[in-house]
Each structure stands twice: as structure tokens, then as C-alpha cells.
């Protein structure tokens, strides 16, 4: 069977009795000076012939690629991670609504040494870039210059003037600390993630600010790195309780570590929340279904990803010059926090 020849713009011009220039202007919505009758004649010809414009030709004409880049850090199973998955899903869905495609890249050392992050723009592979999971050590971010739309998603970077959309992690720390203090907890452990991440510092700053108001100290022995993983959270919770058995509550910098902390506490015979309360941060889907369901700080991760993508498109189209947005957070109370148990003298056990 003979292969059907693709319909070209010349076929549309011939069918509509219009010039190639006129057809091109109509197809690219630049037909302000063309009569409505001519425009309708061209569009009718497009419909009859089943013409589909070449995306490559359109992008060359508009000097846009029609692609957005997403750069993620080199992490084990990064694309399977619930946090990154939420952000990427939001970005992809928003991009698709605006007829954009997504290119995913991993910022590993080899990739950066070869300046592939800059080649994305130099070779016009993408029109804009969204950077996920960045840290204050990611000096390559300073390589991006004017005319290269880049947004840091759910974080910001010290000493690098890049646009960002993020959650209010200072406020998240304040809310978590207020919840535990108002329940009556005075001996509190803290499981943190990577300290080079700016939002990690923001979270701790807000948390300690409230503890100071309640005249509660948080000694170095009450901090433990949970590596942003369930396994790390479990090990951290066990280490904290072994160092100080008087701890009655633990705040975890993300839900994965908090879920791990609950598991670790059970492993050493501690009941949650009867003996140790646990509160997380992010409110990922799984937090509602662990045992007990996790009290956590709701950070609108999906909304942040969608908003970052929308704002990137606005930067590309020059509707925005800068983007500096911080989204509100809130407390989600479930069953993993409660008032501390008290002894006969009325003090926490």
C-alpha cells in the first residue's frame, strides 16, 4: 500500500487560493490585517485537508523550542521519590496545558563538568529550566545568566540571585514547635535533613524561635541527621532515645523520616504517641496511612510545582521580570502526637 503524502502548507495555500505568507500568518495567529473571510477560507482548507503544522517549523519561526527542562540532583531513585514525583507531576501537567513538553536531566558531576546545563540553553533545547532539590553547595547555578529563565523549585540558594517558588519553611517550624509545646512537651528531639539545604535551615530557625519563647532548650544531643529517608529516620529516632530517654516528642524535617522514626521507636518498644509523639513535615499521601497516622505540617508541594511552571512560562513570555514567591503552610493533626504522660508528681515521665 502506497504511503499517503503528508499535507504541506503549500497544499493549504493552493486549496484556499491564498499566498504562503497569508497562510503562515493565519496559522501563527498573526493575522490582524487579514480579512475575516480570508482567514475563514484558510482555516476551512486546513480542516478539509487535515493539515497539522510541524512543531519544529513553528519553534524555528518563534525562536522557541516548546520544551522546558527539569534538573534534579543525583540521588538514589530520584524519580521514584514521592517528593520529587509530586513536583515533577505538577510541572508536567501544567506544561502540557500550555502545549509544552518536558526534558528531565540529572545534575551529576560529569553532567556539570561538561557544562551540559548551559548547553540546554545554548543549543535552544529548552526555553526555561526548573531546578529541584538544590543546595547551597550547587555553585553551578551561578552559571545561568540574563535571558536564561530559571526557577528554583521549593527552595532558594544563598548568594545566587535566582527566581524561586517555595513553601514557608520558617513558618512550618514555628507551627510544629507551637503544636508540641502547647501539648506540654519540654524534652524534644529533632531529626533533620541535609544542612546545606536552605529550607532545612529555615525549618530549624522557625522551630527554635518558638522553643525559645517557651524557654525550652534544644541541646546538640537532641539533633540527629535522618538523611531524608525512612531508614535514616528510624536510626535517628533510636539514637535520640538512647542518648536521652526523657525525650517525649520528635520533630522530623520531612514525612519520610517521621514515618521511619515511628518504625524505629516501635522497634525499641516505645509507643507512639503514648510515650513519644512524632510530627513530620510535607503531608505526603503516605502520612495518612502509617500507624499511627502522622501529624504533620502541610506544605502544598503539588501547588508549588504547578505555580513554578506557570511562573517560568511567564518569564519566558516576558509577562514577569522576577519571581519570588513563598506559599503558606498549615498544621494537619492526626494520631501521632498527644500530651506527654505524667508521673504521680504531675511532671512528664
Image (tube, grey):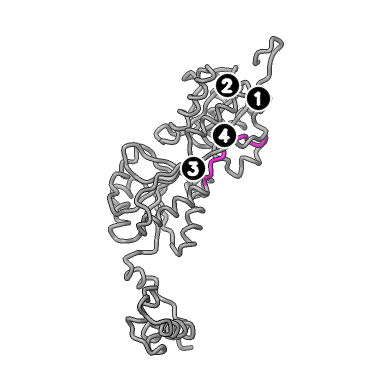
Rendered image: mark on residue 168: none
Q: Earlier in the sequence, mark 4 or mark 3?
A: 4
Q: Nearer the viewer, mark 3 or mark 1?
A: 3
- Residue positioned 57% across, 43% down in the render: 284
* Residue 275 visible in rendering: yes
Q: Nearer the viewer, mark 2 or mark 3?
A: 3
User: Label 2 near label 4: C-beta < 8 Å?
Assistant: no
Q: How far apart are the two marked residues, 3 and 1, measured between alpha carbons?
A: 35 Å
Q: Residues within 10 Å of mark 2 (few under 14, many from 20)?
A: some
Residue under circle 4? 280
Whole-percent x, y for residue 42 in the image: 42, 83
Magenta region: which residues?
A: 291-301
- Residue positioned 48% across, 24% down in the render: 209
Q: Earlier in the sequence, mark 3 or mark 1?
A: 1
Rendered image: mark on residue 241: 2
Find numbered disc 1 in the image and state the secondary structure of the residue it sits on.
loop
Q: Residues within 10 Å of mark 4 (few under 14, many from 20)?
A: many
Residue under circle 3? 327
User: Label 1 near label 2: C-beta < 8 Å?
Assistant: yes
Whole-percent x, y for residue 214 in the image: 54, 19
In depth, the one of 269 and 165 nearer the eye is 165
Q: Earlier in the sequence, mark 1 or mark 4?
A: 1
Amino acid at each position: 500500500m502506497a504511503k499517503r503524502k503528508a499535507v504541506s502548507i503549500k497544499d493549504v495555500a493552493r486549496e484556499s487560493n491564498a499566498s504562503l505568507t497569508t497562510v503562515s500568518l493565519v496559522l501563527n495567529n498573526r493575522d490582524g490585517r487579514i480579512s475575516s473571510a480570508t482567514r475563514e477560507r484558510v482555516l476551512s482548507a486546513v480542516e478539509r485537508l487535515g493539515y497539522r503544522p510541524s512543531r519544529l517549523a513553528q519553534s524555528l519561526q518563534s525562536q522557541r523550542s516548546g520544551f522546558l527542562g527539569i534538573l534534579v540532583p543525583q540521588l538514589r531513585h530520584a524519580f521514584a521519590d514521592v517528593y520529587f514525583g509530586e513536583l515533577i507531576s505538577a510541572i508536567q501537567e501544567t506544561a502540557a496545558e500550555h502545549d509544552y513538553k518536558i526534558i528531565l536531566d540529572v545534575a551529576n558531576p560529569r553532567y556539570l563538568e561538561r557544562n551540559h546545563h548551559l548547553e540546554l540553553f545554548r543549543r535552544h533545547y529548552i526555553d526555561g529550566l526548573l531546578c529541584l532539590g538544590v543546595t547551597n553547595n550547587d555553585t553551578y547555578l551561578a552559571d545561568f545568566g540574563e535571558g536564561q529563565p530559571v526557577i528554583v523549585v521549593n527552595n532558594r540558594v544563598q548568594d545566587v540571585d535566582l527566581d524561586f517558588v517555595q513553601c514557608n519553611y520558617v513558618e512550618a517550624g514555628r507551627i510544629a514547635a507551637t503544636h508540641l509545646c502547647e501539648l506540654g512537651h519540654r524534652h524534644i528531639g529533632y531529626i533533620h535533613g541535609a544542612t546545606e539545604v536552605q529550607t532545612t535551615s529555615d525549618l530549624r530557625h522557625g522551630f527554635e524561635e518558638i522553643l525559645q519563647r517557651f524557654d525550652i532548650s534544644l541541646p546538640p544531643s537532641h539533633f540527629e541527621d535522618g538523611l531524608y529517608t525512612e531508614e535514616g529516620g528510624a536510626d535517628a529516632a533510636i539514637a535520640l532515645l538512647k542518648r536521652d530517654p526523657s525525650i517525649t516528642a520528635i520533630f522530623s524535617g520531612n514525612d519520610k523520616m517521621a514515618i521511619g522514626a515511628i518504625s524505629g521507636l516501635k522497634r525499641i518498644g516505645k509507643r507512639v504517641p503514648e510515650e513519644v509523639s512524632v510530627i513530620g513535615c510535607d503531608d505526603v499521601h503516605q502520612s495518612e496511612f502509617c500507624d499511627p497516622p502522622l501529624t504533620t505540617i502541610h506544605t502544598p508541594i503539588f501547588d508549588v510545582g504547578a505555580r513554578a511552571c506557570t511562573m517560568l512560562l511567564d518569564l519566558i513570555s516576558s509577562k514577569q521580570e522576577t519571581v519570588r514567591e513563598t506559599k503558606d503552610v498549615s498544621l494537619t493533626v492526626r494520631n501521632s502526637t498527644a500530651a506527654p504522660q505524667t508521673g504521680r508528681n504531675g511532671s512528664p515521665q
